[in-house]
Amino acid sequence: MSVTAVTTGGLPALDERKIIPVQPMEQSAKICEYNASSTSASGLVAAIRRDGGVIVRNFASASTLAGLEKEHQPYLDADEGEFFSKDIRMAQGLAGRSPTFCNHLLSNLLWRKVYETFLTEQIYMQLL
C-alpha cells in the first residue's frame, strides 16, 4: 500500500516531518521538579516532552520576583475581574511591560535553551 502526503502552507512532506507519538496523560501524571542550578536544558526538554511540563525551583532570585511583582501589580490592580471572579486578576502583554521579565527570565540561558529547542524544531504530534 502506498501513502501520498499532500501538504499546504509550506509544510514539509509527511516523510520529512519528525513524528513524535504522544500517549494520553493519566490522571495521576507526575510533574517532576528540578533545581535551576543543577539541571540541564536537555533534561528539562526531555521532561517537558514526557510529562507536559516541569517545575523549576530557584529559577529566579527573590529580588527578581520582587521586581516582577512591582512592575506587574499596577496591571493586575487595573483588572476589575469582569471575565472571571473578583479573586482572579488578568493582565496581558506583561513581557512587553516588564524589563525585569525580559532581562532576568526571558534572557536566562537555561530557559533560552529550552524555549529555543521548542521554537526551532518542527514537531508534529500524533495521538495514539
Image (spheres, rainbow, N blue to C red):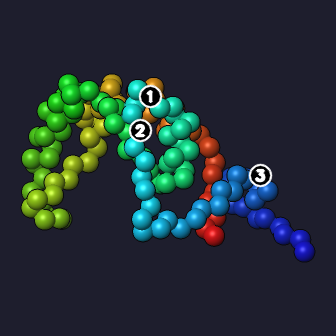
Callouts 2 and 1 close, C-beta under 8 Å = yes
**Residue 69 appears at what percent x and percent y?**
16, 36
- The alpha-carbon separation of the residues under discs 2 and 1 comes to 8 Å
**Circle nearer the viewer, 1 or 3:** 1
**Circle nearer the viewer, 3 or 2:** 2
- The alpha-carbon separation of the residues under discs 3 and 2 comes to 34 Å
Drawn side of residue 2 relative to residue 78, left or right: right
Looking at the rendered structure, the kind of residue marked 3 is Glu
Q: Which mark is residue 34?
A: 2
Looking at the rendered structure, the kind of residue marked 1 is Ser
- Residue at the image position 39 percent from the left and 33 percent from the top: 35
Q: Answer whether residue 89 is visible to the viewer in this image.
A: yes
- Residue at the image position 11 percent from the left and 40 percent from the top: 74
Q: Is residue 67 above or below residue 78?
A: above
**Residue 75 appears at what percent x and percent y?**
15, 44
Residue occupied by mark 1? 38
Q: Which mark is residue 16?
A: 3
Quadrant location, the C terminus: bottom right
Could you classify mark 2 by the number of other residues whose Cα lies within 10 Å: few (under 14), some (14-19), or many (20 or more)?
A: some
